[in-house]
Amino acid sequence: MLLTIFLLLSLIFARPCHAETMYSPNFQLRFGNFNMTSGTKASGSYSLTDTVGQTFANEFTSVGYSTFAGAQYAYTLYDFGFSVSKTSVDLGSLIAGNFASNSLNLIVSAPRQGYTITTAASSRMKSNTDFIANTVCDSGCTKTLAGAWTSAASYGFGYNMSGDDVVPDFAGPTFFRPFPDFSVSDAPATIMTTVESGLLRTATATYQVALDPDQAVGAYETLIYYIATPNY
Amino acid sequence: MKKLLPLIFALNLAILVFAPKTIANTGISISPPTIELLIAPNKNVVQNISLHNLGEAASYRVSLHRLIPLGEDGGSTIDLNPLDPATVPFVFTFPTSLNLQANESTSFTFTIAAASTDKSQAFSLALGFASEQSQASPNSTSTQPIIVLPLLLTLSPDGALDLSLTLENFELPVIADSMLPFDINPKVFNRSSFMHRPGGELVITSPRGVKNNYPVVPSLVLGQTTRRLRFDPVPTLSPSISRFGPHTFAFTLTTPSGKTILTSERIVWFLPLRLILAILSLALIIFAVYLKKSRDQHYAH
């Protein structure tokens, strides 16, 4: 009975322990581990990719440069690749009260520790005289957090993501975000990311517009950036 | 109708000539995917960069940018504004535009020349390869893919760099249920302004002295950032009734040469708590039934 009470009390009052973290303020020399498999020699004395095996501090002091130890992970598997299925996405005739949408595919191959795709628009969709507002979805969404957008009475322009490695706030095909706006110095927003290597990881970006009936007639356009970066 | 034919023909020709130029399937692959370099002042380094066109023929602009770290897993993006080269103590030499035919591979020489300095500094920069944007049609969006080559550079006269790493998120519970999965997700915070790539190991020792080793995958930790550590294999303990008693979690972070930077140790007691609770509940029910029966018998007499 005592053991039972002890176990129950332990369960109830269990707290994380905070042991001492030993830390040594110091300095280090970084060591290079050059890898020949991907190497292309550009200069007899300064190529970064010649394998000479595990090298040590005197490498830096003797030649004046060194890659980081462990940098060989950068050269494994395959090259970093990124492509888009089209460079122009036509939204057709825009009619107030109706959704117009179209999509494109983003395809990534990433070595080592994965990749990150971010996006931004050069500005809101604009004509010579007017802008289409950023969507606020049905009951709120932001440039970094998607929200449900099913009513064409909620006007604006936004995008949905689906497929491999898409960030989780795009919870389904009706979840949208507005694009970050580069013209007002918004930071690009993450749309795909993983810490795993992968070949031909594919996601679909679907753009959607709903026009305000008072929107000025015109030809609206913008430029969407997709920035692909391998994780370091 | 015959009179209209030349007009229709001219209209079709005009549409063909002035139609917006849309390139399908645009993209490139790049090698190496990152450049990480410790370089001394007044030294030049040359790197060949190889590109392969994954799509149709296209032109690419090459420009230098600041790299912006994102999250705790080594992700990043770039400042879309090109970097003013005068703000960094390097001279970079590279072609600013490249024309690639479909499926064409090419390479170019990228030169990094370090300026003269007597103090160590770290720089997170990037080369951006942006396809020339297509002409948009009305009510459309143009798409510009930008492939980024991170340039993680440290300029140092002597290679002696402050090393100040602390371990985070390693506060394990005193008691854990062996019937549930147990995850360990430590992070490293780099207090210094220099990037480091620590290694290390997590060793889990059972009460019977059986040791399981989980080496750290060396990951670059930029200055003043936190990096979630990855292990190979992943130290996730799956539910097991046989996991019982005190287990020791010993973590060691090391320099690339194997010198210990820090150590930390936790002891976690694994108990089949759910099983114990289920047995206790069952015992209580049996005891309650027994009590009720005893009372009923007592009142019957």
Image (spheres, coloured by chain):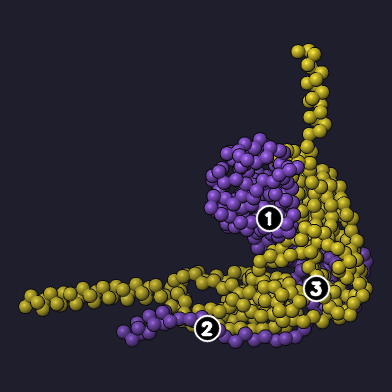
Q: Secondary structure at mark 2?
A: loop
Residue at mark 1 shares a chain with residue at mark 2: yes
Please determine whether, in this image, residue B79 is positioned above or below residue B37: above
Q: Is residue B225 left or right of residue A98?
A: right
Q: Residues within 10 Å of mark 2 (few under 14, many from 20)?
A: some
Q: Is residue B240 left or right of residue A134?
A: left
Q: Residues within 10 Å of mark 3 (few under 14, many from 20)?
A: some
Which mark is drawn over residue A180?
1
Q: Colour of chain A?
A: purple
* C-alpha separation, residue under disc 2 versus residue under disc 3: 36 Å
Residue B162 in which image quadrant: bottom right
Q: Earlier in the sequence, mark 1 or mark 2?
A: 2
Which residue appears at 71% of the width and 79% of the height?
Answer: B191
Q: Residues within 10 Å of mark 1 (few under 14, many from 20)?
A: many
Which mark is drawn over residue B122?
3
* C-alpha separation, residue under disc 1 versus residue under disc 3: 29 Å
Of the two numbered discs 2 and 3 in the rendering, the one whose residue sits closer to the viewer: 3
Q: Position of residue B206 (x, y in %)?
A: 52, 80
Which residue appears at 70% of the width and 70% of the height?
Answer: B219
**The numbered mark 1 sits on a residue in which chain?**
A
Residue occupied by mark 2: A17
